[in-house]
Amino acid sequence: MHAPDGHTRTCGLIGNPVAHTLSPLIQNHMAQATGQNLVYLPFPVARDDLGAAVRGALALGFLGLNVTVPYKSDVIAHLAEIDPLAERIGAVNTLVRCPGGFKGYNTDMPGLYRAMEQDGVEIAGRDVVILGAGGVARAVAVMLLYRGAAGVHILNRTEDKARAVAQEVNSMAGRTFARAYALADYGQIPGADWLVVQATSAGMHPRVEDAPIEAPEFYRHVEIGYDLIFNPGVTRFMKLTENSGGRAYNGAKMLVYQGIIAFELWTGTTISQSTADELCRMMAQA
């Protein structure tokens, strides 16, 4: 690994909080693996200081930034440019230097797509069930639309929220691509062998015993369950999926691949599959 010197480029993570992030582990490992003279650090930023932090990173010559909660939407106001997918999703997690400032990208959803590809999960032409109707669920629905899924079924505790997300995505699609349901109405979803993306915070520390749906009948339909949570490594949603004979995955691989895509955007290098696999093993042990 390069010792920092006068040629070292800096990247970082801004958000609040950032103390427990695994991104420095991922990014600094890639810098070492590819021989890049680059260092990646987390920076806690108070809400009123977001614009100043972005301008400061630009003035200090930062190569790029990651952005985490709660600033993925707020940061858009401070960009010189925005990638079309990030604009449609309405959330940015990666900033890359461009003329006049930073260009914003969303690498979370391409990261999820790459993770699914690596796990042999085919999206094209398939109906997908999404649990939740927050910003992450909306982003997943948009990604699925642009990756050729047949449609999405959005299940949420508050059906009105699910309906609002479905209407927004349908307006992008120009057709009925998304349908909304209350959690209890999962029986209305057609077919079996569902691919389900768990996009709520249920099951995350400290609510590790929670799942958005407990009904065994629901899990009998789940062929593949993707929980976007990566800590704990096995959530209650995943256990319920596996107990009913389904395949279950957590969000660790998505975290790795979103980081890889960001690194590739910053440096112009390509991360090998062997390095990606090594990072996934590291995340499993982190």
Image: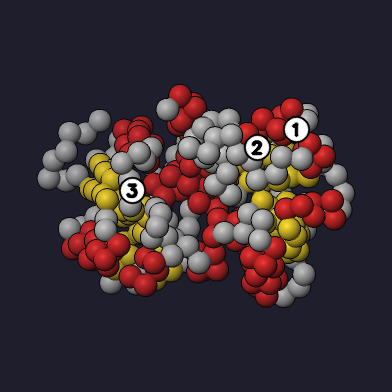
| Crowd around label 1: few <14 · some 14–19 · many ≥20 (10 Å) | many
Q: How far apart are marks 2 and 1 (CA)?
A: 11 Å
Please tell me which residue lies in front, 106 or 139.
Answer: 139
Give percent across and percent down for residue 71.
38, 60
Give percent across and percent down for residue 154.
70, 58
Say what amino acid the circle numbered 3 marks. Answer: Pro
Which of pointers 1 and 3 indicates the residue nearer the eye? 3
- Horizontal side of 59 relative to 12 (left or right) equals left
Q: Which quadrant of the figure has residue 72?
A: bottom left
SS category of the residue bearing label 1: loop
Please tell me which residue lies in front, 181 or 138.
Answer: 181
Outermost residue, left direction? 6
In the picture of the structure, the residue carrying the numbered disc 1 is 246
Q: Residue at x 19, y 44 (%)?
A: 8
SS category of the residue bearing label 2: helix
Q: Earlier in the sequence, mark 2 or mark 1?
A: 2
Q: How far apart are marks 1 and 3 (CA)?
A: 34 Å
Q: Earlier in the sequence, mark 2 or mark 3?
A: 3
Say what amino acid the circle numbered 2 marks. Answer: Phe
- Horizontal side of 243 relative to 79 (left or right) equals right
Outermost residue, top direction? 285
| Crowd around label 3: few <14 · some 14–19 · many ≥20 (10 Å) | some
Q: Which residue is drawn at 75% across and 63% down?
A: 179
In the picture of the structure, the residue carrying the numbered disc 3 is 17
